[in-house]
Image: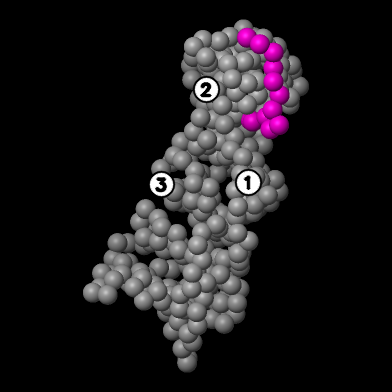
Amino acid sequence: MSGSSSSSREPSFCRHLSRADEFIMALPSHATTTLWGVYMAPTNVHIETDDDRKFTVYISEAKGIFFLFHGWSDVITHLGIKAGTFVIFTPLDSTSFKLTYCVNGLSSICFWSSNVATPSQFTVIPKSVLSKSHDYTVADIISTMYLGNIEFHVKVQSCNGKVCFTAGIDVIVTQYQLEAGSYFLFTKWFGHSFHLRVFDKNGIEMNFDHVRVDDVDIAPIDSLQDLPPTAVAEQATGHIIRFVRMAADYFAKLDLGVKSITIRLLHLNPHKEFPNGTIRQARLEGYCYALSSWSRLMNIAGIKVGDTVYFCFDETEQVLSVERVVSPLNHS
């Protein structure tokens, strides 16, 4: 093994420990190549734990793969971790790492989740992370999530007795084309704000610095995920899709093609009709739509935050109609 070769950007990486990893742990090839060069590695690295203990861990090599070997079990023993623990290595320099970890999916400051194949998945939020002053069974909230320099808004709601991130996580998955098996690491900031780090299925932290995201004011509109199959009516001219959404005043940012459709406000007397920029995102079941100039549409339609809005979309005619708007005060 040869001396180290520093990189302009030293990647963080993670590992969901197996039983074998407690004694010898393989390092991701992409990380070692970026840090030290092809088929190169230092003799040892330095690992610093959250309690400021420092360990020297020696590296071994077999068939072109580098492993944390002698000294690694000392780190495992000191931290008292075992198989099933999620560990994150953040480079301090090319041969030194800060090690943090999550036991049962959770640490004192963060928690992790694996991205599954279905983009509309629910991500359960550990109870210890939740605000003690909010009753999630009474009212949903919108969480602000930061991925690099990009801000997303994700719905937090109670689902089958658990509190979860729901609508909005699928936007992130689609926006960045994340594969099944990638990892989310959520770190709570304040209130319901979170910093999100994403690792690919090989455990390498993904860098989205060069991913372009259009700064378009749009508000996502959920379609069929919460409605029965009868919500879609097959007609001779195509699909008529009906869906319901609670209105919010926040915006999302997506990098998808914007086109114009017709908006019809059928709940007003007289009816109003006008063109509007729209983003349509394909889902595994149905579609997800996003409307540009959402705040303007809310003003014209008389929609307020918290109102329940009943939509009807004619896919063939490309017409989105607002059929009914119900204020929370009018719910039975």
For disc 3, the marked residue is 118
Asked if labels 3 and 2 touch by Cβ distance under 8 angstroms, the answer is no
- Element carrying mark 2: loop
Cα separation, mark 2 vs mark 3, equals 24 Å
- Badge 1 amino acid: His
- Element carrying mark 3: loop
Give the numbered dot on residue 329. none
The residue shown at (52%, 35%) is: 200
Q: Is residue 9 magenta?
A: yes
Q: Name the side, left or right, on which 222 lies relative to 105.
A: left
Residue 28 higher or lower than 67, as above or below: below
Q: How far across and how far down the image is residue 306, in percent?
A: 56, 69
For disc 1, the marked residue is 210
Which quarter of the image is occupied by the C terminus?
A: bottom left
Q: How far across and how far down the image is residue 93, in percent?
A: 73, 24
- Badge 3 amino acid: Thr
- Badge 2 amino acid: Leu
